[in-house]
Amino acid sequence: MIWIDSSFAVEWLLGSRRAEKTPFTNQPGAILPAQYAEVLVYFEKKGVGLTAVVEQLEPLELGQATREELQKGASLYLRARKKRAKVSLADAMLGAVASSRDEAILSYDGDFADLGFTEANGLWTSQKS
């Protein structure tokens, strides 16, 4: 499973060159509700009809975090913020889910480095992996 962050999803939906170059493999993709909502907010602010956006997101599984992953995400968030990193709670939750399941994240958001991930071509993996 590859988890999709909103920063990647927006560029992917816009058809950016950067998104075209990112290795979106044949693995199934999933998105958490917070990132899904962030994508919808982005396009709603731009005045884009959401019907087409929702249709394009349809192939992605709408994932859910377990209680343990939510606890881990809260800890990741607080640890990063204590170091003055500007990490969002949504990204911390996504990081917790991906690292707990030993799965990768597609994102153009550098905040994942503050959550213990390393990046190659937009693909973030947990440093514990």
Image (cartoon, rainbow, N blue to C red):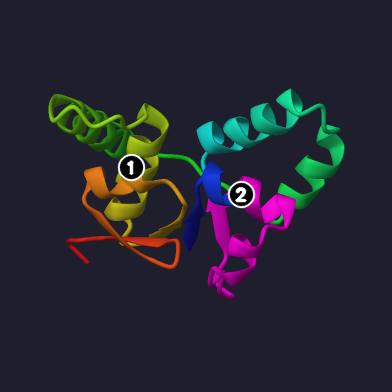
Region rendered in magenta: 9-31
Instruction: Where is residue 31? Give x, y as percent.
Output: 55, 46
With respect to residue 76, does 113 lie above or below? below
Instruction: Where is residue 48? Give x, y as percent.
Output: 82, 33
Please tell me which residue lies in front, 61 or 56: 56
Would residue 20 be counted in the magenta stretch?
yes
| Residue drawn at point x = 60 percent, y = 37 percent | 36
| Residue drawn at point x = 30 percent, y = 39 percent | 69
Q: Which residue is tagged 1?
A: 111
Please tell me which residue lies in front, 16 or 129: 16
Instruction: Where is residue 3? Give x, y as percent.
Output: 48, 54
- 16 left or right of 86 in image: right
Instruction: Where is residue 27? Give x, y as percent.
Output: 54, 71
| Residue drawn at point x = 15 percent, y = 31 percent | 79
How far apart are the two marked residues, 2 and 1, measured between alpha carbons?
A: 16 Å
Hey, what amino acid is under mark 2? Ala
Residue 31 appears anywhere in the view: no
- 39 left or right of 102 in image: right
Q: Which residue is tagged 2?
A: 9
Label 1 crowd bin: few (<14), some (14–19), many (20+), radius 10 Å: some
Residue 21 appears anywhere in the view: yes
- Asked which secondary structure carries label 1, the reply is helix
Please tell me which residue lies in front, 97 or 115: 115
- Asked which secondary structure carries label 2, the reply is helix
Quadrant housing residue 82: top left
Which mark is first along the chain, 1 or 2? 2
Would residue 108 be counted in the magenta stretch?
no
Label 2 crowd bin: few (<14), some (14–19), many (20+), radius 10 Å: many
